[in-house]
Image (cartoon, grey):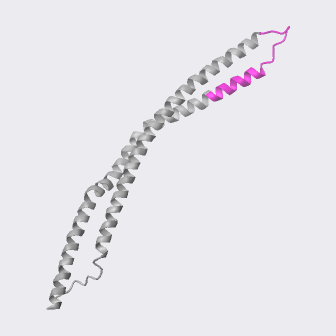
Amino acid sequence: MPTANVYALERLPEFKAALQIFADKAKDAMSGNAMDIRRARDWLQTQLDFWQAEVRRAEDAVVLAKNELSRKKMMRIGDRSPDTTDQEKALRKAQARLAHAEEKRDNTKRWIRQLPDAIEEYDGQSRPFLDALEYDVAKMIAYLEQKIIALEEYQRIQAEGGAT
């Protein structure tokens, strides 16, 4: 009668437990990814709102700086124009702040437009892994349980056959 040469049957339940632990940790990680994606979407919307408000404030600052510069240029001290260096610096600073805020707002809008495609790509690549975690690992564990039972029965039969 041929023998199966099973030497470490106790390792199979350990492997089955490790497989279950892996599946549970992987599912938790995938859930964490989904939450991070939702947080990123919400954060981008918050950033868009912030930068749109910042653009409005910067536009107001530019208008004020232009008005101040115009007012200063209209003043005459005798026959010469007044020094407008401070007002020109303030205007350049306000324009730079506006350009910065517009750049941030535009970048955020672009990222918001790109995010659904990136999420769809991620979902497409992660779906087979999630399916494997949900269905294939359960099948693997059931298969291992069947084989453990069969091997234990085989060992029992071998032990009884060897004893007789």
17 sits left or right of 73 in the view: left
Above or below for 8 versus 43: below
The number of numbered badges drawn on the structure is: 0
Q: Quadrant of the N terminus?
A: bottom left
- The residue furthest right is 78
The residue nearer to you, when weighing 84 against 132, is: 132
Q: Quadrant of the C terminus?
A: bottom left
Magenta segment includes 85:
yes
Magenta segment includes 134:
no
Above or below for 30 versus 71: below
Please name the residue shown 37% across and 57% down the image.
Answer: 25
162 sits left or right of 64 in the view: left
160 sits left or right of 39 in the view: left
Q: Which residues are magenta?
A: 75-97
Above or below for 140 versus 72: below
Please name the residue shown 59% across and 23% down the image.
Answer: 57
Question: Which image quarter: residue 20?
Answer: bottom left
Residue 126 in percent (x, y) is at 35, 52
79 sits left or right of 70 in the view: right
Please name the residue shown 28% across and 54% down the image.
Answer: 131
Residue 144 in percent (x, y) is at 24, 69
Residue 116 in percent (x, y) is at 39, 40
